[in-house]
Image (spheres, grey):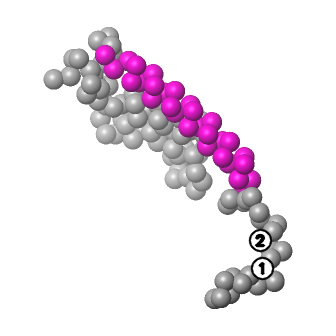
Amino acid sequence: MCKEGVEKTEDAPHKASHAGMVGGVDADLARTQHTAVYHRVSALLGQYVDGMGDRGKKVIKFASPAEILEVFGSVCADDGGAERERGASADEVVRLCELVLDYSVRTSSPLFF
């Protein structure tokens, strides 16, 4: 775009070829994938909330910081603990949400005081 807001002609073909693309990914596909992850995580949260009053569940699943890093690192790291250079997959995002809920303190539990 020029300062006046008029599109330059040499940019037009480039922009047209990327219409509907977000970061090189088809926008509709990305939206569908994000919606699927949203529904899976929403279901997890629903189950978590439904089980809040369950006296049979532990208030806390204690783990040391090193243990928590190891558990989360097994999902977050590539190839033996190396820092990843890409985003998490949909399954990894859902798994990380499961771990967060699993290691969270259940402050709404009737046994929490």
Q: Position of residue 106 (x, y in %)?
A: 29, 26
* Marking on residue 15: 2
Q: SS class of the residue under badge 1? A: loop
Q: SS class of the residue under badge 2? A: helix
12 in magenta:
no
The residue at 60%/53% (across/down) is 86
The residue type indicated by label 2 comes to: Lys
Q: Quadrant of the C terminus?
A: top left
Residue 95 visible? The answer is no
The residue at 34%/39% (across/down) is 66
Examine the rendered structure and indicate whether residue 1 appears above or below residue 97: below
Query: Residue reaching furthest left?
Result: 113
Residue 100 appears left or right of 84: left
Q: Position of residue 4 (x, y in %)?
A: 65, 88
The residue type indicated by label 1 comes to: Asp
- Circles 2 and 1: CB atoms closer than 8 Å: yes
Q: Which residue carries the number 1 mark?
A: 11
Magenta highlight range: 25-53
The residue at 56%/31% (across/down) is 40
Query: Mark 2 and mark 1: span between their CA atoms?
Result: 6 Å
The kind of secondary structure the magenta stretch mainly shows is helix
